[in-house]
Amino acid sequence: RKPTSVEVDFAANYAEESSYGYTSMKWKLANFVSEGTYEIKIETKCDQLGGPPDIDMSSTSILSGVIDLTLPDQYGQVLPLRDTVLLGEELVVVFTEPLRCEKPFTFDLQVIIEGTNYR
């Protein structure tokens, strides 16, 4: 793939500027970019202040990352593969990719015991 650049206007009405003049912005990438590996570099060009040219701009180092918008899916059946499970027995659910199992949890889990009101 050929690298491309996309210009983002931090002065637009969707950006938030602090009282110190710093701007922050949340990027909503879903439906705008495809999954893959990306490199992001931020460059700023300010109004000319009358000094050396490099004082009117700033640039960050390149940040590399992966955009993964596909949710993990259950792969196969819950283990052990039988109709009944003993009290205290471990159940294993395998997913199509590793889950981020750190607090705060970004997923919900619900266990339903059939024939009871327990959930």
Image (spheres, rainbow, N blue to C red):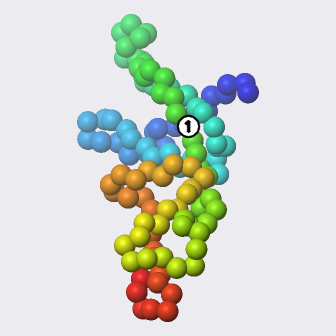
Residue 30: in sight, yes or no? no
Residue 75 versus residue 36: which sits nearer the camera?
75
Residue sticking out furthest to the top: 52
Can residue 36 be seen here? The reply is yes
Of residues 34 and 21, the one nearer the viewer is 34
Q: Which amino acid does label 1 sit on?
A: Val
> Where residue 97 sits: x, y (%)?
56, 49
Determine the residue positioned at 44% across, 92% down: 116
Q: Name the residue under label 1.
A: 66
Within-10-Å neighbours for mark 1: few <14, some 14–19, many 20+: few
- The image shows a total of numbered marks equal to 1
Residue 116 left/right relative to 1: left
Could you tell me residue 70's position as x and y percent? 61, 52
75 and 19: which is toward the camera: 75
Rendering coords of residue 17 (x, y %): 35, 42
Image quadrant occupied by the C terminus: bottom left
Decide: is 23 above or below 13: above
Where 10 sits versus 62, above or below? Answer: below
Location of residue 76 by image quarter: bottom right
User: Is residue 9 placed above or below 54 in the rendered structure?
Assistant: below
Write the residue at 46% across / 39% down: 11
Q: Position of residue 98 (x, y in %)?
A: 51, 49
At a point 48% along the width and 52% down the height, the residue shown is 99
Q: What element carries label 1?
A: strand
Point 52% across, 33% down: residue: 65
Quadrant in which the N terminus appears: top right
